[in-house]
Structures are given as C-alpha cells and as structure tokens.
Image (tube, helix red, strand yellow):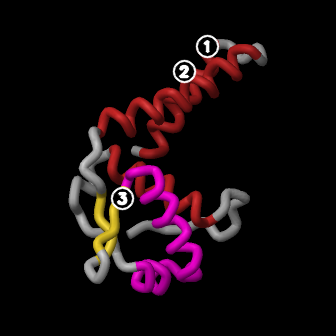
Amino acid sequence: MFSIDLTSRVPIYEQICKKIIELVLNGTLSENEQLPSVRSFAKNSGVNPNTVAKAYQELERNGIIYSVPGRGSFISKQKMEQFRDSALADFDKVTVSALDMGIPPNELKKRIDKIHDEKG
C-alpha cells in the first residue's frame, strides 16, 4: 500500500494514519473501500500488528474508517471537505507560526513550490 519510514521520529502508527488520510484526500482510497487486514498490512509493511491495529483504532475513533466485525475496515462515508478543511486548518496554523517567526511569505511560497515539485 505504501512505505513506512522506520527511521523517522514520527511514530509508525501516526505515519500510517497520515498516509491513509492523504490517500483519501487525493482520491486513491474512496468511500467504502476496504483496507488491508491488520495482519496483512503488518506482514507487507514489516510493522508490528499491534501498531497497525493502533493506527486503525485511531482512524476509526476520528471517523475516517469504520470496522465491520468479520469483514474488515473500510473508508467512512465522510465529506471529503472535512478532511480538506482539517488539513488546511493545520496548514494555516503552521503558516501563521512561520510568519510570526519572521519567515517572509515569498520564502514560504518557494517552499510550497519545491514540495509540490518533489511530489511530482
């Protein structure tokens, strides 16, 4: 499904959560689409099943996925605008913080362009 950075300071379960949200936002995962089982995800990514389960629990707690006993976990019927609004709110907070620290707007714009180009 995607790779996990085992050397990152970001906890693995958070990386899984963020990546699944990203895949929903960019349309790779759609409403009611089934996610891999915890065991399958763990085996394919080399991550402990408990870590994957923790990520799925966090995603379910936040209404991003839902579980059906005996069937698995699925992407919730959420308005994509909710995800987008949340991501943009986080972006706004970080941008305001950067501006407050004296980073000029043109430097922030260059940074956004660079990230966009790298994501290709």
Left or right: residue 5 compared with residue 118: right
Q: Position of residue 40 (x, y in %)?
A: 40, 84
Is disc 1 placed on a helix, strand or loop? helix
Instruction: Name the quarter where the N terminus is drawn.
Output: bottom left
Residue at (34, 44) in percent of width and height? 25
Residue at (39, 39) in percent of width and height? 83
Look at the image and give the residue range highlighted in magenta: 38-64
Is disc 3 placed on a helix, strand or loop? strand
The vertical placement of 47 against 79, above or below, is below
Amino acid beneath label 1: Pro
Q: Position of residue 3 (x, y in %)?
A: 49, 68
Q: Residues within 10 Å of mark 2 (few under 14, many from 20)?
A: few
Residue 105, disc: 1
Question: Outermost residue, right direction?
Answer: 101
Q: How far apart are the alpha carbons under marks 2 and 3?
A: 33 Å
Q: Position of residue 22 (x, y in %)?
A: 41, 49
Residue 4, disc: none
In the rendered structure, does residue 111 fall within the stretch colored magenta?
no
Query: Which image quarter: residue 60?
Result: bottom left
What residue would you read off at disc 3?
65
Left or right: residue 75 compared with residue 3: left
Residue at (26, 79) in percent of width and height? 71
